[in-house]
Image (tube, rainbow, N blue to C red):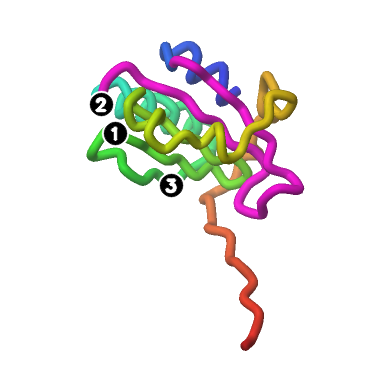
């Protein structure tokens, strides 16, 4: 559902990365590009609207700037970049192996609000 919404909004170079077993921050990461800062902000707004219809209230970071918007959808993290910024940070190189990419992320379950995950810190 997330990938389909982004694709319908003309997001470019959509990559989905399963994170299970690699990180505790989320189960999946979606990385996409928008053509401009305005397109990046628009993609984030449309994604937020689609999720709100399902009763899911994601947290957004960077929506005012438009270079890189991060959407925390609970078990899914969505990165929306301008192409130059995406190239600079190159998250694909950090997180992806070619065999890792999956075509679609399972739809997130509806819930009242996304609560941030707490990291367990070992006592010193």
Q: Position of residue 116 (x, y in %)?
A: 53, 58
Determine contact: label 1, label 2, CB under 8 Å: yes
Viewer-proximal residue among 65 and 13? 13
Judged from the image, the secondary structure of the residue bearing numbered disc 2 is helix
Image quadrant in which the C terminus is located: bottom right
Label 1 – label 2 distance at C-alpha? 6 Å
Q: Point out the tag, 3 or 2, that comes first from the N-terminus.
A: 2
Label 1 – label 3 distance at C-alpha? 17 Å
According to the picture, the residue beneath numbered tag 2 turns out to be 37
Q: Nearer the viewer, mark 3 or mark 2?
A: 2
According to the picture, the residue beneath numbered tag 3 turns out to be 59
Q: Position of residue 61 (x, y in %)?
A: 36, 46
Residue 101 magenta-drawn? no
Q: Nearer the viewer, mark 1 or mark 3?
A: 1
Q: Which residues are magenta?
A: 12-36
Q: Residue at x 45, y 15 (%)?
A: 12
According to the picture, the residue beneath numbered tag 1 turns out to be 67
Q: Position of residue 9 (x, y in %)?
A: 42, 14
Label 3 – label 2 distance at C-alpha? 19 Å
Q: Quadrant of residue 48?
A: top left
Q: Point out the tag, 1 or 2, that comes first from the N-terminus.
A: 2
Image quadrant in which the N terminus is located: top right
Q: Which mark is residue 36?
A: none
Residue 28 magenta-drawn? yes
């Amino acid at each position: 559902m997330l990938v389909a919404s982004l694709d319908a909004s003309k997001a470019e170079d959509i990559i989905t990365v399963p994170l299970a077993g690699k990180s505790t921050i989320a189960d999946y990461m979606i990385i996409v590009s928008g053509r401009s800062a305005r397109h990046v902000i628009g993609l984030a707004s449309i994604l937020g609207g689609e999720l709100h219809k399902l009763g899911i209230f994601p947290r957004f970071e960077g929506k005012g700037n438009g270079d890189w918007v991060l959407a925390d959808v609970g078990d899914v993290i969505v990165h929306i970049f301008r192409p130059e910024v995406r190239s600079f940070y190159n998250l694909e190189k950090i997180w992806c192996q070619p065999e890792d990419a999956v075509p679609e992320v399972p739809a997130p379950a509806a819930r009242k609000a996304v609560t941030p995950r707490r990291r367990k810190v070992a006592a010193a």
